[in-house]
Image: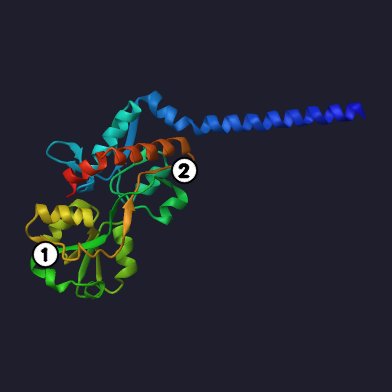
Amino acid sequence: MVNMKMKSIVAGALLGAAVLGVGSFAASAEAGKLEDIQAAGVLKVGTTGDYKPMSYLNKETGAYEGFDTAVCELLGEALGVKVVYVPTTWRELQNDTLAGKFDIAMCGITRTFAREKILSMSKGYLVFGKTILCRKEDAKKFKSEADLNKKSVRVMTNPGGTNEKFAVSNLPDCTHLSHEQNAEIPGLVAEGKADVMITETMEARRYVKDDPRLAAPLIDAPFTKNQFGIMMKQGEQDFLNFVNFFMEEKELDGTLAKLEDKYIK
């Protein structure tokens, strides 16, 4: 009887040790991403580089600019590493993130349930909504979604992003046009090659400032209300925790508000 009890105690101890071992291994694996980035000395950031004023590749200087780019540089400083930008497209953004081509993606990425199901998204930052860009002379034509949802209205979006999804879902009767380079669409609208660009309030505000031919008549009454998020692979909880902590601190100390004043307002 004593031997049976001893065997039971030993077995329980071994099982407990095994569980603890698994827990320790899981904790070690979980902590790996943050440690790997710091050990490598590099934070790889995926960006489409075509979204003013969030993350935009300045072709004259060859450098990335914008709100998200500035935040990434500060995140790199907080981690004590160098930031390296990895080009991607809206069509391939999700797959490239899943494939681990970069540590985070940050270029004006809308938080959505579909993305959160297979990827991790940080807590939201900057509230915005879907709206339109059109030629200034056409501004009075578009007062609602119904005014857009007509065969005669050519609506252009970039493929693979939430702008395209919004247009397909909410404007089934318009004439849909697709253009791979998001940064070129405002110019195409201004030239009359499309009537409307589905975009977001941040981007619309910037392009109206940059191009006097454009207008954003519905900017104060956007179709949706969303937030941006920083995207990464699932299973990197330690790194996600650090990113969320970093963003919360930068909001509290006024850094995000200053960057918003600089790049967006």
Q: Secondary structure at mark 1?
A: strand
Residue 161 in sight from this viewpoint: no
How packed mark 1 is, by other alpha carbons closer than 10 Å (few <14, some 14-19, many 20 or more), is many
> How are the colours assigned in the image?
rainbow
Q: Secondary structure at mark 2?
A: loop
Specify the quadrant of the image occupied by residue 167.
bottom left
How packed mark 2 is, by other alpha carbons closer than 10 Å (few <14, some 14-19, many 20 or more), is some
Measuring from the top left, give residue 126's x and y in whole percent.
29, 50
Q: Which residue is mark 2?
A: 234
Measuring from the top left, give residue 115's x and y in whole percent.
41, 52
Residue 203 in sight from this viewpoint: yes
Which image quadrant: the N terminus? top right
Above or below residue 259? Residue 112 is below
Residue at image position (15%, 52%) is 206
Q: Nearer the viewer, residue 179 or 255?
A: 255
Residue at image position (35%, 49%) is 124
Identify the amino acid type marked 1: Arg
Measuring from the top left, give residue 153's x and y in whole percent.
20, 72
Seen as rendered, the residue at the extreme right is 1
Q: Which residue is mark 1?
A: 135
How many callouts does the rendering have? 2
Specify the quadrant of the image occupied by residue 248.
top left
Label 2 to label 1: alpha-carbon separation = 42 Å
Q: Does label 2 or label 1 sit earlier along the sequence? A: 1
Specify the quadrant of the image occupied by residue 79.
top left
Above or below residue 118? Residue 43 is above
Measuring from the top left, give residue 258's x and y in whole percent.
21, 41
Residue at image position (27%, 33%) is 73
Residue 125 falls left or right of residue 189: right
